[in-house]
Amino acid sequence: MAENINQEEYKSVSLFRKRIKRFKKFKRGYYSFYIILVMYIASFFAPFIMSNKALIVKYEGETYFPVLKYHSGKEFGQDVFGEADYRALKLQLKQERQGNWVLMPLYPYGPYESLTDPTKEPPNPPSPQHLFGTDDRGRDVFVRLAYGFNISISFALVLIAVCYFVGICIGAALGYYGGWFDIVFQRIIEIWQAMPFLFIVIIISAIIQPNFSLLVGIAAFFGWMGMTYFMRGEFYREKAKDYVQAAVSMGASDRIVIFKHILPNALTPVISFAPFTIVGYIGFLVSLDYLGFGLPPPTPSWGELVSQGMGNIFSWWLVLFPLGALFVTLLLVVFIGESVRNAFDPREYSRLR
Amino acid sequence: MANNIIEVKNLCVRFPIFGGLFLRKVAEVKAIDGISFDMIRGETLGMVGESGCGKTTAGRAIINILHTIAPDVIVEGEIWLNTDEGRIEVANLKKKTMKPYRAEIQMIFQDPFASLNPRLTVMRIVEEPMLLHTKMSKAERTEHVGWLLDKVGLNPEQSQRYPHEFSGGQRQRIGIARALATNPKLIIADEPVSALDVSIQAQVINLLQDLQDEFGLTFLFIAHDISVVEHISSRIAVMYLGNLVEIGLADSIYNDPKHPYSKALLSAVPLPDPKGVGKRERIILKGDVPSPLAKPSGCGFRTRCPIAKESCAKEVPPLRDFGDGRSVACPWV
């Protein structure tokens, strides 16, 4: 029997798996990661959860899916211009009791519609219909925050992907080839980095109305330098190690040495910095939108809501909820970053708990 | 086929140092200052010398990997490699042109914890040379890796593990298996046992000797521990400050060193029998090794040499042939 125990399958684990395992031990970061992940995935389905467009309309024997396809109000016998008003349609069909019905999303308000109430001037305080109240144009704050969450996180993720990709490639080349190429290119990077990034973005935005991809492009154009320093340093250190020498002595090409041997061992700073960089990029988009140089209106953005709070400082819901959402999101991402850093720290006992 | 597997002719390796505002070359470290030696097929040439004497650089110059760490390195002289296809000068070959000959020369590294990529499995590490130099199928490679691991005394079933799951001695065996993967003729062993425990050292050295007998390998065995070198080597080359000071058969150098530096080096070897300690003459050298940045003129050893004369400062003493393969770079012995 003892032999059977000895022969039990020994599970071999790679370094990366070990670190994932260790990351899972840090509950705060692990749960934060799941919360952010679930919220982000859910935010892609926001049109199905919170929208003024009906999910399904059963009208005169036909089934419509307005959430996927535009239908004018005339198709449902409504006397409105443009798209049908599905909330009104729902009430109307319910009263008619002719077997026609409308299925609305859980939270039946859209991010762009002005819910102007003739009796009250917007912004309106929170109510059972509008959980977080409405903004100064009568748009639902809760819905705009939810749509803005998706845009904020997407912006940060796309920007970090572009910046890190460029930064890693250039940093790796600098560190691996070294010599004159390194010296000259580093000076170029230093000059580049000395440019006042935020002002340039503001000037460009003032001339041309930026959209999502243009904003990512501008931000990446001035934001890729940070990672090159880390990658350059990592490559300098790793290429002097014997396993790289061994690969070169076996005749491995630069491509194999860089991507197969050095890069996987040089990614630690990338992974441990990423969450904090994401925090920075979310804050960057918020500040641009706050100043009015970010995404064009009426894009639901957090910075725009924060600036509305600034303009209507006594409408407490316009101050509290956007700032609260920003605070909670950034805090969760920081928790993730902290746990990732701890999981990648080889010194077991230096962790802050 | 020529009897010599490799012929090193007047090899010089210099590392330029850049400084100042415009990064001009301000100095040069002469790591190797004109060494020449041949290696005979099937022998083990032990290369000894203290730290910084250029023995590791010599090994890395032969295998042509110095440019990875130091892109500005200057390698002069000739290294002729005798392959089945003919005689090729490899010292100045570029990366692409060197590749076909890489399979002939392999290297075993000093630190078994640094010489294996921690992200790859043992299987992937050992099969790498096959991926680069052969067109073996996956099944063939797996089989060959298993065979190699078995040869170096490891369990082939452990090939899916990662290096950090092995001990130092086992990791060095993985390194040896990798070096054998392309069936090389020459293996440069750069202090392969100095990072290991003494008990493991003996195992690894015996393994190397067994493999040499089985595959007819030629070893360039670089070490600073002369007793290890004496055990494994058929010939010994003694280096000092980038120069070869003495080369010859292991027994004759070990029992009767001629160059004053070799004498001092050997007198520092601890004796296994404490009774002999008092009887032996201990030669203690004065001062430190001069910086390779500012080498003394003429003979590099003259500043510390007990028998130095004025004329030693004039020119670098050439290797003098003493017969029986013995050469000494000192005119006074």
Image (tube, helix red, strand yellow):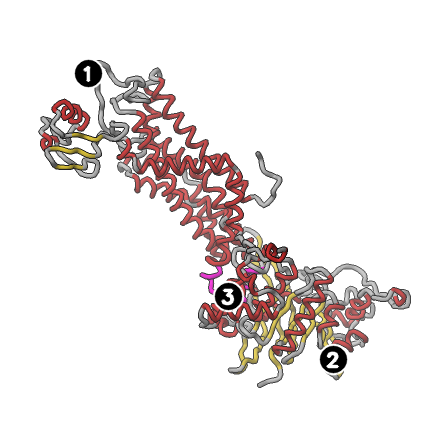
Span of residues in magenta: A242-257
Q: Mark 2, residues whose alpha carbon is within 10 Å: few (<14), some, or many (≥20)?
A: many
Q: Is residue A210 above or below residue A325?
A: below
Tell me what residue is drawn at x 73 percent, y 62 percent.
B199
Tell me what residue is drawn at x 61 percent, y 65 percent.
B154
> Closer to the observer: label 3 or label 2?
3
Tell me what residue is drawn at x 37 percent, y 31 percent.
A286
Q: Main secondary structure of the magenta part?
A: helix
SS for callout 1: loop
In depth, the one of B87 and A40 nearer the eye is: A40
Q: Mark 1, chain letter?
A: A
Using the numbered discs, state the Cα–Cα distance from disc 1 to disc 3 in whole angstroms: 76 Å
Q: Is residue A114 left or right of residue B31?
A: left
Q: Are marks 1 and 3 on the same chain?
A: no
What amino acid does circle 1 point to? Pro
* Residue wearing tag 2: B326
Q: Mark 3, residues whose alpha carbon is within 10 Å: few (<14), some, or many (≥20)?
A: many
* Residue wearing tag 3: B128
Q: Mark 1, residues whose alpha carbon is within 10 Å: few (<14), some, or many (≥20)?
A: few
Indicate yes or no whether the magenta region holds residue A288: no
What amino acid does circle 2 point to? Arg
N-term mark: 3 or 2: 3
Q: Mark 3, chain letter?
A: B
SS for callout 2: strand
What amino acid does circle 3 point to? Glu
Q: Quadrant of residue A329?
A: top left
In depth, the one of B254 and B127 nearer the eye is: B127
